Each structure stands twice: as structure tokens, then as C-alpha cells.
Image (spheres, rainbow, N blue to C red):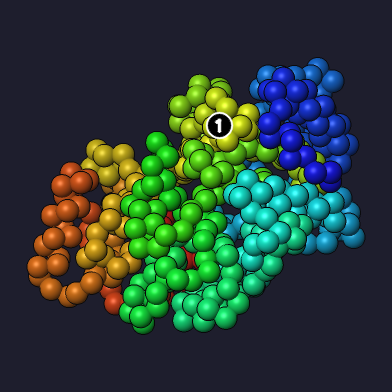
């Protein structure tokens, strides 16, 4: 795929023309090769030749996570011999989904992450320490690896966890950047404090943050982001992506939202009636993949709730930007009359020094109402600590969730099930 860096700065009408051309190619492709979309078009009497503009997309029904889960193989558009990589979703919102990639899809994935690292001020002179899994069918791991290779930068494939090994490798190989989950960066900082490592003297100058929000919707750093930057003078870049979209939204140095790659994706933010919302209004991120060969998707609803901003960024890029994830549609909690999303609860729990780690569990009571149980690892086992935590939660939430205190070993077992690739912070046991 050709280098398209300048496209980030093109006028919107030129970007629209490009997307409409790629959309027409996609519609012809899936109408010929996708069992799922051939059936969808037939059942809904959709004539794809009548779809010319981006606004015409609304004619096509949306695709859901359940469609992918129930009919996974029907989305495959190529024979099995063309598949070179099988990846899967983490199964956060139900059973995992397999996404098959061709050689062309891997090339596209590499370009996507190459563009993302460029957006996050990356260059060939950088060395990235990857603090995430590159196995277990995890698309992000292979994507970062391929993108950094295309960038020409150095790669240290260290994997997740083990703060002592991370710091020993940083000292020995001197990476300029890390790719990590923000809550793990806090564990690195804590380990450094406990062992006398002077983190201000290390080679690391920036972190690509994956999997968790580091900003509020006004782009200010949230509690997690503040805790990192107050302890460690590094630049943070937030990212948002999913296995299904095979594309990432990545912040530039301005930190004003994840930048959109219009040559790789069409994005809509839809309300409850599947209508496009206005800027600065929460909507469900709905994507149409462009240039995907193995398992392309049309109007796929991710379940993630975001806002978008369509004015040009001060960095000069003209395409829209996405806010941090405000929540997942299926993870919304109605607890004692209060509406909660897990990211907001994460912020509250990250804020307290009395809480070292946590998992939120939601379940239904005997009459079908949402109940919230917090598994907490406290800094100390005392009545005074318990009182401070409960008083804080009551004051901030105006409701009192159930609390179960656990030790570090118990917390590790709750967060990392046998098949988990990353720490589980939210468990949904609702019927």
C-alpha cells in the first residue's frame, strides 16, 4: 500500500470522493464473495448499484456483534488457502470472534499501525518496548510489530507483566518508547519506587497507551493519566482500535482525540435509531472497513460509545477525531436509579490511594435489577481504610456498591482467567 501520509491533511471533499470510490469497490466485492452480505442484500432487496454516496450507506442494515458470533464463517470472502493469519477478539462482550487475514490484510494492518506511530510522533530513530502479548491470536500485538517494522524503528518484544524484567531491559537496551496498558505503567512506577529506580533518568520518553482510557471526554488527563505523568515525565499517546475494524484511532501530540484514517475505514456514530449523531454527541461507533480482503464488514456496530469532533486539529490534520470511549453500550449499568459506565467507575477507583487494584462485577438480583460488586485490593486491612473507601464511593456515586476485599493472589486469579490475554477489570454476569 502506498504511503498516504498527506491524506491526513487533505480537504474533506477529496477524502469523501476517495471513500465513495472505495465503498463502491467494497460493495461489489462483498456482493460477490461474502455469504453473509449476499444474503443480507437479497433479504432486504438492496440494489448496490443505487448506493453511490456515503449518505446512501443508511440503506444497508447494520451488522451486530451477534451476527459475527453466530455466523462467523459466513463473513469470510476468501478460500482458506488464502488465509495467512487467524486472530480473534478477546470475548469481552460474549464469545470470541475469529478474524481471518490474507497477506494483503497484513499489509494493510502494517500500514495502519505505521500511520498510527507516525501520528504519535514516531520515527525510525525510536526503539519500542512492547509490553503486550504477541501470541494467543491477539491482533494488536502483530499489528504493532508490523507497524514498527514498516516505520524502521527498533522493536523489543518483551511481552506483558514482570516489572523487574521490564526495567532491567529498559536499562540494558534503552528504548525510547513503550507500548503498554496504562494501569501496568502504574505498576512499573510503583516497582521503581519500591526498588530505588530513578525513572526520570531512563531512556523512555513516550508511551503508546492501549486498552484503557487516559483522558476524559474534554481531553484532559483522567486520574490514570495524571497518576502516570505526575510520577514519570513522559509523553502519553492514547489509542482506540478493535480486532474487527483492523484499524486504529491514534492521538497526535496535541492529545485532542484519536485521528481517523479515512482511506482504511468509514466511521458513523449512530443513535438508538441508527441515525448519525451530531458532533459532540455520544453515539455508537459503527464502522465499514475499506481495503479488507478476508473478512470485510459493512456498518458494523462496535458497541463502543464515543463522541466525534469534525473541526481540523491544531496539528493540521483535517479528518474527524474520536473522543475516549465513554462506555460500551452493553456494559451500561442501571444501579439504584443511577446510570454508570465502567470507564467512569475505573476513574473513581484509580483515584484512591487506598485501592491498589480492583475488578468490577455486575450481576442481576432476584428481580432482574443490576447489582454491583467491587473486588478491591486495599493498601491495608483496617477498619479505617474500609471506612474511607466506603465514604468516598457513597459521596461520588451517591449509591453504595457491595465490596469484597481480596489479597494480591486472589486478585490475580480474578483478573487473569486461564484464557485471558489481558487483565479483566469488568465482569458482566447479568442474565
Query: Which residue is pictured at 73% across the width and 34% down the height?
Result: 7
Give above or below for 108 relative to 275. Answer: below
Question: Residue 301 occupies which quadrant of the picture?
Answer: top right
- Residue 314 placement, left or right of 127: left
Between residue 188 and residue 233, name the one nearer to us: 233
Q: Position of residue 234 (x, y in %)?
A: 46, 58
Residue 208 location (% of width, % of height): 55, 56
Which residue lies at the image location 11% right of the left edge and 62% below the top edge?
Answer: 387
Q: Nearer the viewer, residue 342 or 419?
A: 342
- Residue at screen point 33% across, 43% down: 340
- Residue 175, compared with residue 341, is above or below; it is below
* In-image side of 376 versus 267 (left or right): left
Q: Residue 111 or 268: which is nearer the viewer?
A: 111
**Which residue is situated farthest in the front direction here?**
201
Query: Residue shown at 43%/50% (left/top)?
Result: 214
Q: Which of the two residues, 41 or 349, is positioned nearer the viewer here?
A: 349
Mark 1 Cα shell of 10 Å, populated few (<14), some (14-19), many (≥20): some
Q: Is residue 266 above or below residue 424?
A: above
Q: Secondary structure at mark 1?
A: loop
Residue at the spot of label 1: 313
Amino acid at each position: 500500500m502506498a504511503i498516504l501520509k498527506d491524506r491526513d491533511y487533505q480537504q474533506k471533499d477529496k477524502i469523501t470522493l476517495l471513500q465513495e470510490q472505495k465503498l463502491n469497490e467494497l460493495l461489489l466485492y462483498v456482493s460477490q464473495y461474502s455469504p453473509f452480505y449476499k444474503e443480507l442484500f437479497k433479504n432486504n432487496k438492496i440494489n448496490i448499484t443505487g448506493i453511490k454516496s456515503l449518505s446512501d450507506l443508511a440503506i444497508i442494515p447494520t451488522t451486530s456483534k451477534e451476527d459475527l458470533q453466530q455466523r462467523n464463517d459466513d463473513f469470510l470472502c476468501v478460500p482458506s488457502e488464502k488465509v495467512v493469519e487467524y486472530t480473534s477478539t478477546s470475548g469481552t462482550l460474549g464469545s470470541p470472534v475469529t478474524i481471518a487475514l490474507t497477506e494483503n490484510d497484513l499489509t494493510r494492518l502494517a500500514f495502519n499501525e505505521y500511520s498510527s506511530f507516525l501520528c504519535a510522533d514516531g520515527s525510525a530513530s525510536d526503539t519500542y518496548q512492547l509490553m503486550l502479548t504477541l501470541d494467543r491470536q491477539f491482533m494488536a500485538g502483530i499489528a504493532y510489530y508490523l507497524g514498527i517494522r514498516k516505520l524502521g524503528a527498533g522493536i523489543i518484544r518483551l511481552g506483558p507483566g514482570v516489572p523487574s524484567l521490564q526495567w532491567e531491559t529498559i536499562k540494558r537496551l534503552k528504548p525510547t518508547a513503550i507500548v503498554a496498558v496504562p494501569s501496568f505503567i502504574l505498576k512499573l512506577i510503583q516497582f521503581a519506587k519500591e526498588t530505588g529506580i530513578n525513572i526520570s533518568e531512563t531512556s523512555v520518553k513516550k508511551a503508546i497507551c492501549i486498552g484503557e482510557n487516559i483522558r476524559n471526554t474534554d481531553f484532559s488527563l483522567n486520574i490514570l493519566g495524571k497518576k502516570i505523568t505526575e510520577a514519570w515525565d513522559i509523553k502519553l499517546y492514547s489509542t482506540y482500535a478493535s480486532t474487527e475494524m483492523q484499524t486504529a484511532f491514534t492521538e497526535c501530540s496535541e492529545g485532542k482525540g484519536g485521528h481517523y484514517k479515512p482511506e482504511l475505514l468509514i466511521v458513523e456514530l449512530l443513535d438508538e435509531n441508527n441515525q448519525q449523531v451530531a458532533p459532540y454527541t455520544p453515539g455508537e461507533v459503527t464502522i465499514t472497513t475499506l481495503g479488507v480482503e478476508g473478512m470485510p464488514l459493512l456498518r458494523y456496530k462496535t458497541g463502543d460509545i464515543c463522541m466525534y469532533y469534525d473541526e481540523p486539529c491544531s496539528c493540521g490534520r483535517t479528518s474527524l477525531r474520536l473522543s475516549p470511549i465513554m462506555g460500551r453500550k452493553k456494559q451500561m449499568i442501571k444501579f439504584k436509579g443511577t446510570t454508570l459506565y465502567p470507564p467512569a467507575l475505573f476513574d473513581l477507583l484509580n483515584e484512591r490511594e487506598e485501592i491498589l487494584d480492583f475488578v468490577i462485577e455486575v450481576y442481576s438480583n432476584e428481580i432482574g435489577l443490576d447489582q454491583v460488586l467491587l473486588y478491591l485490593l486495599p493498601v491495608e486491612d483496617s477498619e479505617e481504610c474500609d471506612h474511607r473507601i466506603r465514604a468516598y464511593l457513597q459521596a461520588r456515586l451517591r449509591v453504595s456498591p457491595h465490596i469484597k476485599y481480596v489479597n494480591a493472589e486472589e486478585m490475580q486469579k480474578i483478573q487473569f482467567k486461564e484464557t485471558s490475554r489481558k487483565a479483566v477489570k469488568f465482569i458482566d454476569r447479568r442474565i
